[in-house]
Image (cartoon, rainbow, N blue to C red):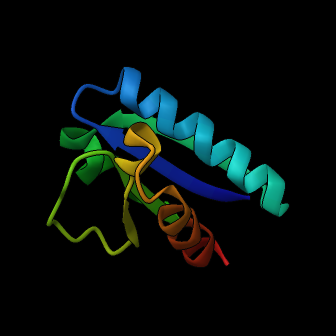
Amino acid sequence: MKKIVVACAGAVLTSIIAADRITELCRGAGIPVDIQRCTVDELPTRAAGADLIVCTVRVTDDWGVPVVYGAPFITGQDVATTEDEVLAALR
């Protein structure tokens, strides 16, 4: 089981949309996931033990975990590239 933390500014709508898209992506790839949502401000305490962080806003901090920019899950632009980045980080 891979732990993914999905973060956005408010941990409400955009993180829900991104988390749903990631869940479907991973299900289709046969990768079991545990997805947790949080705000970007919570990442320093939520990143521990994560296999991947997906943020819908740009971040520059290093939590020792791969980070993928997840806004394309919201905007619909360049989604295939973002999906590839997520899958590559989890394999």
Snapshot quadrant of residue 38: top left
Q: Toward the viewer: 30 or 51?
A: 30
Q: Toward the viewer: 29 or 81?
A: 81
Q: Up-down: is 57 above or below 80?
A: above
Q: Position of residue 2 (x, y in %)?
A: 66, 60
Q: Name the residue: 39% across, 21% down.
A: 13
Residue 49 seen: no
Q: Position of residue 88 (x, y in %)?
A: 59, 78
Q: Quadrant of the C terminus?
A: bottom right
Q: Is residue 42 left or right of residue 49?
A: left
Snapshot quadrant of residue 84: bottom right
Q: Toward the viewer: 1 or 18?
A: 18
Q: Which residue is the extreme one toward the front?
A: 77
Q: Up-down: is 79 above or below 75?
A: below
Q: Is residue 12 left or right of residue 34?
A: left
Residue 88 seen: yes
Q: Name the residue: 70% across, 52% down.
A: 25
Q: Position of residue 23 (x, y in %)?
A: 67, 43
Q: Name the residue: 43% across, 44% down.
A: 6
Q: Toward the viewer: 47 or 25?
A: 25
Q: Is residue 34 left or right of residue 71?
A: right
Q: Which residue is the extreme one toward the top?
A: 12
Q: Name the residue: 41% across, 33% down.
A: 15
* Circle count: 0
Snapshot quadrant of residue 75: top left
Q: Up-down: is 59 above or below 20?
A: below
Q: Quadrant of the N terminus?
A: bottom right
Q: Position of residue 56 (x, y in %)?
A: 31, 45
